[in-house]
Image: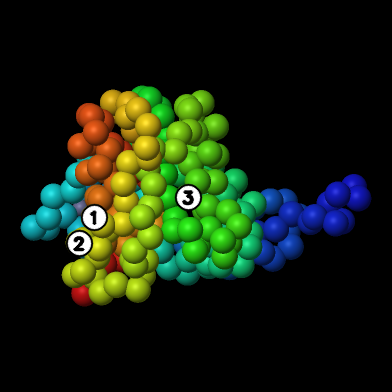
Amino acid sequence: MKLRTLIFPPRCPFCGSIMEREEPCAVCLAQTTELTGVVCGVCGCLPEHCLCRGRSFAFDRNVGAFLYEGAPRRLLLRFKQRGKPQLAVFAARRMAYHIQGRLGRDFDCVTYVPQSLSSHYRRGYCPARLLAEEVAARLELPCRCLLARHGGKQQKYVANDERWSNAMHNFCLRRGASIPARILLIDDLMTTGATLNACAALLKSAGAARVVACTFAIAAKKS
Ligand SMILES: [Zn+2]
Ligand SMILES: [Zn+2]
């Protein structure tokens, strides 16, 4: 056995259990819903969770890789809260698989939803940026920072019906950024779609013709 394998053994990306190879364990696979079946062509949700009724989005569509529950939820918690930036590699591999399989790679660049400064200082890295860089490398596209964050309240602290107005106040275009026509917008999670909608609206107001979002996970709509 190689020394590196002893020091850094392969692990299940979802739960961190030590494995023989870098692959999901059977327990996590049983708790994982990958969004490969019939999903909404706009929000990317399973039909029973569709967010589009009575609502139109500024993004053209969202492509999500997993339902936010069970093992994918555990992966995002470890990636974002437990200092595991290396999980971006596995997460982005699945995201790139879904994007390429459903839409190809016909984009001018990849960009991402920026996090607040306080989150950045707390984590030391930006999860969405790491995902965007990995997705861009896999799709052989440039990754560019086009958006900035003002601060404001984080969406998770705001009630669902306030998220739309809150999101619109949280972001702005990065000063001096030139906005291409076809953009792939990356984030880790879509809950209501408000954040992705606000970012896509900004990009379109600055000249983008098509904004496709891609998130690692999509939360099931709360009824
Ligand atoms: Zn596992
Ligand atoms: Zn929908």
Q: Tell me if residue 191 comes above or below residue 139 in the rendering.
A: below
Which class describes the residues within 10 Å of circle 2: few (<14), some (14-19), or many (20+)? few
Between the C-alphas of marks 3 and 1, the distance is 19 Å
Q: Quadrant of the C terminus?
A: bottom left
Residue drawn 49% across and 63% down?
118
Of circles 3 and 1, which is in front? 1
Between the C-alphas of marks 2 and 3, the distance is 22 Å
Q: Which mark is residue 157?
A: none
Query: Which of the two discs, 3 and 1, labels the residue nearer the N terminus?
Result: 3
According to the image, label 1 marks what residue? 168
Residue drawn 84% across and 51% down?
5
123 sits to left or right of 37 = right
Front one among 24 and 125: 125
Residue drawn 90% across and 47% down?
2
Identify the amino acid type marked 2.
Answer: Ser
According to the image, label 3 marks what residue? 128
Residue drawn 44% across and 38% down?
145
Which class describes the residues within 10 Å of circle 3: few (<14), some (14-19), or many (20+)? many
Q: Which mark is residue 165?
A: 2
Of circles 2 and 3, which is in front? 2
Query: Which of the two discs, 2 and 3, labels the residue nearer the N terminus?
Result: 3
17 sits to left or right of 3 = left
Check disc 3 and report its element: helix, strand or loop. Answer: helix
Q: Tell me if residue 175 comes above or below residue 199 in the rendering.
A: above
Which class describes the residues within 10 Å of circle 1: few (<14), some (14-19), or many (20+)? some
Identify the amino acid type marked 3.
Answer: Ala
Check disc 2 and report its element: helix, strand or loop. Answer: helix
Cβ atoms under marks 2 and 3 closer than 8 Å: no
